[in-house]
Image (spheres, helix red, strand yellow):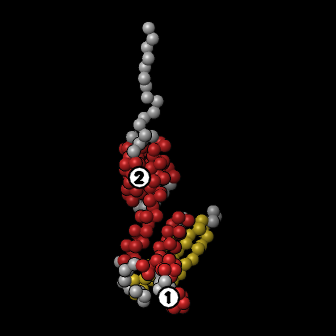
Amino acid sequence: TSTTSTTSSAAAAPTPLEFERAAELIRAKLTEAGGLFGTTTAMLDVLRQVKVSTNLEEEGVYTALKSFLRAEPLRLRATIKSAVASLSVGGRCCFLARSRREMETLRGFVLENEEPDLFLRTSLGMTSRLCELYPLLTTDLSYSLRRIVGVTVKVGSQSETLEYFVVQKCERSAP
């Protein structure tokens, strides 16, 4: 007689919800750590905890980590928006970006909330092209941003790049 046995060689693929939960767990652990894992070992410890808590295989945990990192610009934008909204008109805020992705997110947010200068506004009038260049014109925000300082600095022996911006909240002059 022959015996056949059926065994599953792989567990069921994790669902997007499982990845989201794992990504949220990573975010919560990062928040608990004060926003920064002090060492690579500390980050690996968190990833191990996520693996145990979620029953995901290592590849699933890394997929969740990638999901978390893709969502970071959205979280950063929300943080920047909240900080700016809390300012009074004339108030200033300094933002520091440590990674290229943070720099792009910060620059993009500032550019999307700037008003055109008088010359460009007069030259183009309120055309669709001006609105493409200055997306703020298509919103009902009561304020605009003006970049006061934007500096890129190389620090340390590994030439880490830091970029900081000081922005000022201004009353909108255009509708």
Residue 141, above or below 56:
below
Q: Quadrant of the C terminus?
A: bottom left
User: Which residue is at the front of the view, 154 or 170?
Assistant: 170
Q: Position of residue 62 (x, y in %)?
A: 48, 47
Give whichever of discs 1 and 2 has the lower sequence position: 2
Disc 2 marks which residue? 23
Residue 152 visible in the current orientation: yes
Per the rendering, the mark at residue 103 is none
**Disc 1 vs disc 2: which is toward the camera?**
1
For the residue marked with disc 1, what is the amino acid?
Gly
User: Which residue is at the front of the view, 89 or 142?
Assistant: 142
Q: Position of residue 18 (x, y in %)?
A: 38, 46
Q: Position of residue 170 (x, y in %)?
A: 42, 86
Disc 1 marks which residue? 125
| Left or right, 61 with reference to 53 | right
Residue 47, above or below 38:
above
Q: Residue at x 47, y 58 (%)?
A: 70
User: Which residue is at the front of the view, 143 or 166?
Assistant: 143
For the residue marked with disc 2, what is the amino acid?
Ala
**Mark 2, residues whose alpha carbon is within 10 Å: few (<14), some, or many (≥20)?**
many
Question: Marks 1 and 2, Cα distance to the nearest angstrom?
Answer: 46 Å
Residue 87 visible in the current orientation: no
Q: Quadrant of the N terminus?
A: top left
Residue 151, above or below 58:
below
Circle 2 sits in a helix, a strand or a loop, which is it? helix
